[in-house]
Image (tube, grey):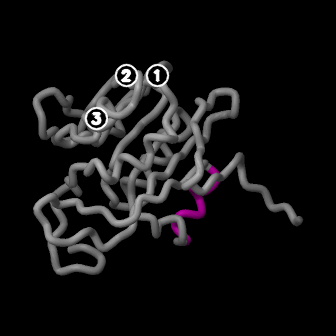
């Protein structure tokens, strides 16, 4: 069940990404980039990227249980990231074990835009991952089920993680509307 509802969650957290949830991240993506979508489901997010991002080049769309013929069947933790891959862009399962493992495995290899609940940044469990976090782009509440009369109970955000050395990081346009986190956090007094 959801955190504040009586509804059963869908198996494997399969909720296709609505266009309204995707659009806030568009101004923060560069032109002409390469990406993979490792939690592609039915490919809705890939379609949004292809429709709204100039020069986006999909290298791989995969899922542990693909919902479209053109999406490859892969466990994301078995993926090998090509050196030419600039980003992972995905709406991952919100299960913390999966989410945290994903951040640990990939943030040192590639920049990652992940869509999940906005409350996460305010929890103790986020502390080990905050040094890898570069930006938070607020989305608000999302209507995950198209024919539903209501929106989801949680606010959402796009989180941009990148723990590569500065010289390896790709240009990401951080614009107004995002909480900017520049560089590693240090304990400094003002």
Nearer the observer, 161 or 77: 161
Determine the residue positioned at 55% across, 71% down: 124
Give left or right: position of 65 versus 88: left
Determine the residue positioned at 22% across, 79% down: 5
Dividing the picture into quadrants, the one containing residue 185 is bottom right
The C terminus - image quarter: bottom right
Residue 92 locus on image (x, y percent): 33, 50
- Give the mark, 2 or 3, whose residue is nearer the N terminus: 3
Q: Residues within 10 Å of mark 2 (few under 14, many from 20)?
A: some
Q: How crowded is mark 3: few (under 14 residues within 10 Å), some or many (20 or more)?
A: many
Give left or right: position of 94 versus 40: right
Is label 1 in contact with label 2 (beta carbons under 8 Å)?
A: yes
Residue 12: in magenta span: no
Give left or right: position of 78 versus 24: left
Residue 154 locus on image (x, y percent): 35, 70
- Residue 57, numbered circle: 2
- Which residue has dot 3 on it? 46
Nearer the observer, 152 or 8: 152
Q: Residues within 10 Å of mark 1 (few under 14, many from 20)?
A: few
Dividing the picture into quadrants, the one containing residue 4 is bottom left
Badge 3 element: helix
Badge 2 element: strand
Is label 2 in contact with label 3 (beta carbons under 8 Å)?
A: no
Is label 1 in contact with label 3 (beta carbons under 8 Å)?
A: no
Nearer the observer, 112 or 177: 177
Determine the residue positioned at 57% across, 51% down: 135
Q: Mostly what secondary structure, the magenta segment?
A: helix
For the record, the magenta segment spans: 124-131
- Which residue has dot 1 on it? 32
Q: For the view shown, which residue lies furthest in the right direction?
A: 190
Determine the residue positioned at 44% across, 21% down: 82
């Amino acid at each position: 069940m959801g955190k504040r509802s009586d509804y059963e969650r869908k198996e494997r957290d399969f909720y296709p990404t609505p266009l309204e949830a995707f659009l806030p991240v568009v101004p923060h993506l560069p032109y002409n980039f390469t990406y993979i979508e490792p939690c592609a489901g039915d490919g809705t997010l890939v379609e949004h990227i292809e429709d709204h991002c100039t020069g986006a080049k999909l290298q791989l769309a995969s899922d542990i249980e693909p919902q479209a013929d053109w999406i490859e069947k892969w466990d994301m933790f078995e993926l090998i990231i090509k050196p030419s891959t600039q980003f992972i862009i995905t709406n991952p399962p919100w299960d913390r074990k999966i989410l945290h493992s994903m951040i640990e495995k990939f943030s040192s290899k590639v920049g990652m835009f992940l869509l999940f609940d906005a409350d996460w940044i305010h929890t103790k469990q986020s502390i080990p991952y905050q040094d890898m976090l570069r930006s938070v782009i607020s989305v608000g509440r999302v209507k995950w089920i198209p024919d539903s009369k209501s929106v989801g109970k949680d606010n959402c955000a796009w989180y941009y993680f990148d723990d590569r050395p500065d010289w390896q990081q790709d240009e990401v346009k951080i614009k107004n509307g995002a909480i900017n986190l520049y560089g590693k956090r240090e304990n400094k007094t003002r």
